[in-house]
Image (spheres, rainbow, N blue to C red):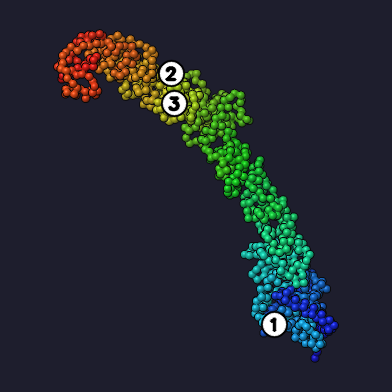
Amino acid sequence: MALADPFGTAALRESVLVAWESSPTRLREDAAAEADLVRAGYRDRVFTELAQNAADAAAKAAAATGRAARSLPLCSITVWATDRELHIANTGAPLDTAGVQALAALRASDKEARPTPGPTVGRFGVGFTSVRAISDEIEIRSTSGSVLFSAERTRAAVAERGIAAPVDPPTLRLPWPAKKRPRTGADTEVVLHLRAGVDARELLGSIIDEATDLLLELPALEIIKVGDTELRRTVKRMSHGVALVSIGVRSWWQFATDRARWLLPVEDGRPIPAGNDVLRAPTRSDEELSLPALVVADVEMQPDRRRLLPGADIAALAKGYAKFARALPPPLRLLLVPRATFARSEADRLLRDALRAELRARTWLPVVGNHGGVRPPTAAVLPGLTPELAELLAEAVPALVIPELSDSSRVAVLSDLGVRPLGLADVTEALSGLDRPPAWWHRLYAALEPLLVDRLAGEELGALPVPLADGRLVTGPRTTMVGELAGAAELPVHWARLVHPVAAHPLLGRLGAQSVTALDLLRDPALRSELEATADPDTDGDLDGRSDGDLADAVLALAADVADPGQLPSWLGLLPLPDADGELRPVDELLLPRAPLAGLLDDDAPFGTIDPAVVARFGVDVLRAIGAVWSFGVLRESDPTGPDHDLDDESAWWDWLPEDPAELVAVRDLELVAAHAWPAALELLAHDPRIQGLLGDRNGYTAWWLRRHACVHGQLLGMLLAPGATAFAGLLDPLDHPDADAFAASLADPDSLNGDLIVVLAQRLSDPDRRPTPATVADTHRRLAEGLAHGLVEPSEIPLPQQIRAVSGALIAPDDALVLDRPWLAAAIPADRLVVGDLAGAADLAALLDVRLASEAVHATVTSTGRVTSWEDDPLGVLVRATLALRPDTGPLVVHAELTVKLTGAVTGTARVPWWVTEDGTTHLQQP
């Protein structure tokens, strides 16, 4: 019984055989065409082409039911092998006459003849020829009928017709009807009888490898089952047109435009760039691409679907690509930007350029405050931007790329899209003049600090605005000061650029801001200048619009923050504060209530009383620290240059110093003490910790001034002795005061005489009420002579005494006084006539007292006879020379049993003496 031939295969075979009979060339052409497609165009694409046919069958089924493309019935493909047969079964529209004709046509496909609701790839067209790469006998079993293509039957048919066949005739030109139907559940089943040498297991493995790509590329396919392995594609709608496509363990984010589907691979739940791939049109071609996403598109391809058709507009695929970028979460959008690398093909170059152009021209790039996006050329990127910094810069720097896309590795990508890279200098410029609270600036500095990584960054941030404690906003941290100061937030520190403490941050120090303490600010020369300006009546209490009240508030608040008030500069006393009458006066002219100094001053002392309200507000301790008068003021200055400190008699002290002092520390206003108040004043000085150290400095101004000017009980301190002193005892009185020891440096010092003390001592020596000991008399005469020798006094400066104090303590007439200048004369002249000091200074003492030298007023002749000997031969000579430390060449020696001399001149008579030296240098000794 003849097989049914629903597709008219007999007529098809007849027409082909007739053509071959009439034109051997046509036979050769058909054979060559089939061979070329098998060897080149469709090599290793067997399953791909059959899967495409299955997908087209699903599209055709949709057309038959009138459904839209979006509701295409999904197709499943089942693949298995039995013996030497490979079976590929699918659902979808069954085989029809047009399909059979297309299968036998080699160069034609039936898809153009029948529009479908979705894209078709090539139903039963030239692609089907790929089966010839592995099979010589192909069955197509369908629910509508089956056909067979057989190489053996084709050769037999050609031979039967007597057609000369110089080549093997093409198998797929002659179809025969077949009897078998597809497996249950399938609409079509292709059976390939495998050639010898084709490994069925290996073939199934390669089909499994292709299955994922085909499910991804052909949306009409849902399931591909190969043997026991089944792969299923699922699609889950996400937001903004993005869908999650999953096949097995692999996933992609898919976005469809009018011209293409774009797929971004997903790993561990996050999308990643696709890397190197090929154009999928819709299945894999040989056009190599290097795009961030896979692209599946209906684009004009050459018949073998491996290469683009010349002139194909591949750039058109880029249209709508920016919508995909906009649909992604903002931190992921740069994944879709093609990288600036070498193109892998001309198609790659054209498509990458088109994608970049599309991205440049559309709004998708997320910026701070607008995650919907802007066009890249209108945006700016700051490398290293953090979320905190982004929030702070949002208003100052418009269209700033979000922090997640601003790391340095992405700057080149953004620049390629036209985004303007920003440096820290650009940020600094944008912040200029910005009005923000100090806390905002502190947050900004904290956010900028991680970006300060090198010297260049420091230079770019050099003009960063800085808010000051007095409310100003200045440019550049290098000119500012940072300090931890209590209450500095409200301090109007106009003389220094003090950073507002709320804004202070370590970044400012790294950019050159100076770290300061309250003491540093109060020592600032600029403050001194400002205080000196307040003393200028032309300022009218206002400095560039800043009131004295602001200045006082700042200085007093800072002074309260200084641990050691003794370190404060004395010129803070220039600070103007109101007195009890409301008039502004320097604080060092204002007495504090109940100040101990108040009862010690002269009536005309230039002091007022400070306003009690000021005392109540700031406290006594702070006011005392800056110079308000409680006790004596202390002036301090390093490296003074001259006597210009308004200290009493300062020039005289400066001239008295052997060299300029390295530091001036002095008690002020000593000259204002009332004469009767000095005992109390000394007590106040002695118990003031600020002053105690100054009292012991004999060369310091304070001790110097007290020596010269302070009087206790009518006597200058410099003319009084320290308790227990022996020098000048009986001539000078000791200081009678409980704190006398504290003023030792201000009292008379025997080792540091001055002209005034010499005059007083000379007068006291002739005072009959004084009872100095002989030792004190001799020691004082010696010191007076040394003072004259050293130029401390001129003889004319000393009033000639009416009486001279002899070594015995007796007061004698000047004409009777003789200054001892030869030691042997002491035994011959009475002690009541001798004035004794130091033999070396005898001439100076005689000049000072205007009396005669003993050697000039008294003459003597040795009257006894002695034994002439020598210093070397006589034991007495040896002993005397040793005990008197005489020189070896002391002249001749005469030893007497009893030595006597006859005196003439101021003293007459004969005297027995232990030794004598005559004018010729002979020494006379009395034998013991």
The foreground one among 557 and 90 is 90
Residue located at (18% from left, 13% from top): 900
* Image quarter (top left, top right, bottom left or bottom right) of the C terminus: top left
Name the residue that disc number 3 marks: 659
**Dots 3, 2 in contact, CB < 8 A:** no
Sequence-earlier tag: 2 or 1: 1
The spot of residue 189 in percent (x, y) is: 73, 80
Name the residue that disc number 1 marks: 194
Q: Quadrant of residue 193?
A: bottom right
**Dots 2, 1 in contact, CB < 8 A:** no
User: Is residue 707 visible from the viewing direction of this image?
Assistant: yes
Q: Quadrant of residue 524?
A: top right
Name the residue that disc number 2 marks: 675
The foreground one among 335 and 102 is 102
- The answer to whether 898 is drawn above or below residue 235 in the figure is above
Side of 9 where 790 appears, left or right: left
The foreground one among 780 and 153 is 153
